Image (cartoon, grey):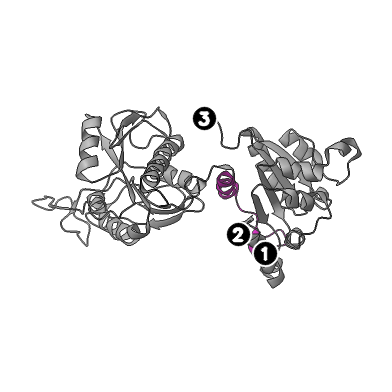
Amino acid sequence: MRSSFAGKNIVVGVTGSIAAFKVAGWVSTLAKEEAQVSVIMTRSAREFIAPLTFAALSGNPVHGEMFDPVRAERMDHIALGRDADLVLVAPATADTIARLAGGLADDLLTTTVLAARAPVVVCPAMNSRMYLHPATQDNIGRLKKFGYQVLTPAAGMMACREEGPGRLPEWEDVQEILLRAVTEQDLVGERVLITAGPTREHLDPARFLSNRSSGKMGYALARTAFRRGAEVHLVSGPVALPCPAGVRRVSIQTAREMHAAVSQLADAASVIVKAAAVADFRPAVEEREKVKKDRAGLSLELSRNPDILHELGQTKKEGQILVGFAAESSNLEAEGRKKLATKNLDLIAVNNICSDSTGFECDTNQILLIDREREVLLPMTGKEQTADMIWDRVVELRRQRQEMSGGGR
């Protein structure tokens, strides 16, 4: 599957910080994902790392001087900003941030940023005292008012042997912000609530009832919704997955905890996607001590858990889009249509859990997507691509509703 960065013109402005070495890896990754990367290095950046490094990793010449006699006819300070799909300033020193905040245009990087009409992402990296200084914080505030995305630096041990905020974030976090910047924002204005993962229903302190859900599909939905501009809340059962950048996660264990969290967030959501595999039953009694295997007359009495999706369907607000998931082993279309109707859904994604490629814990999926008008069998693909196809249909449903109502959401 083609990367979202492929074919994008990305300008990377590197300034004078030891963290420039880390950005070299980012440039390499972007180039491998087929982005056209143009690197601008300030004079102080060249004191930390050689331009040849970035030239080799990006596959393009490195830009440095405002007036380059070799490329004089191109007017780099205008052309780079004009042609960019994204400008990334990383690492951004306190001095660079101050000059950008003041609107200065005294070198190639600052003039390029001023000329750019593309999204600008700034990654501060500096000593903690410098980062926390009121002047730096004021300058960061000004950049945000300009519409620039300023990332919060990571905390930890600095090169100066002091500890605190000021480290360059990890690529995984930066990547999501960049992907959002180059992705069509067709979910802007949507407040999305997603459930993901399994639940655990405790029998005793050592044992619980659960299922094989990995949460991968729900997390893919959260990542892609954020990239497309949505505000995303994720209610997640216990999974071995990091929280996607930009997503607000509520971690739960049991079905009743998920029910409480969803009930609290549902009213504010414009789209709800229930991708979690919630236990239908729980032990009627949770033992306070571990049940011994030699205990006589062992039996397990179960109580029914709340049907979260059914409740959401019964209380659905006007304009709210409700999407369900169904893990089935046979009769996918019939079972999907039945749940679409009985639970008052707008859209349901049905997958075959008996397939080696689409069952639990897989990285791929093939969904039968059913709404009130049609059903479409999506191609077998990765879960992020599947998530994007689900969001495509949600966007289409939203547009149809707006056309019918003659206006906004």
Q: Which residues are magenta?
A: 158-181
Q: Which residue is mark 1?
A: 142
How much space separates mark 2 and mark 3, taking CA atoms? 31 Å
Decide if residue 70 is in sight here.
yes
Q: Which residue is mark 3?
A: 1
Q: If you read the primary sequence from the N terminus, does the residue marked by circle 2 or circle 3 appear first? A: 3
Identify the element where label 1 is drawn. Answer: helix
Q: Amino acid at mark 3?
A: Met
Numbered tag placed on residue 152 in the rendering = 2
Please tell me whether mark 2 or mark 1 is closer to you in this view: 1
Residue 352 x %, y %: 29, 31
Mark 3 or mark 1: which comes first in sequence? Answer: 3
Q: Is residue 168 magenta?
A: yes
Q: CA–CA distance between discs 2 and 1?
A: 15 Å
> What percent of the width, then of the height, locates residue 285?
16, 58
Number of residues whose C-alpha sits closer than 10 Å to that of mark 2, classed few (under 14), some (14–19) or many (20 or more): some
Within-10-Å neighbours for mark 3: few <14, some 14–19, many 20+: few
The spot of residue 212 in percent (x, y) is: 31, 41
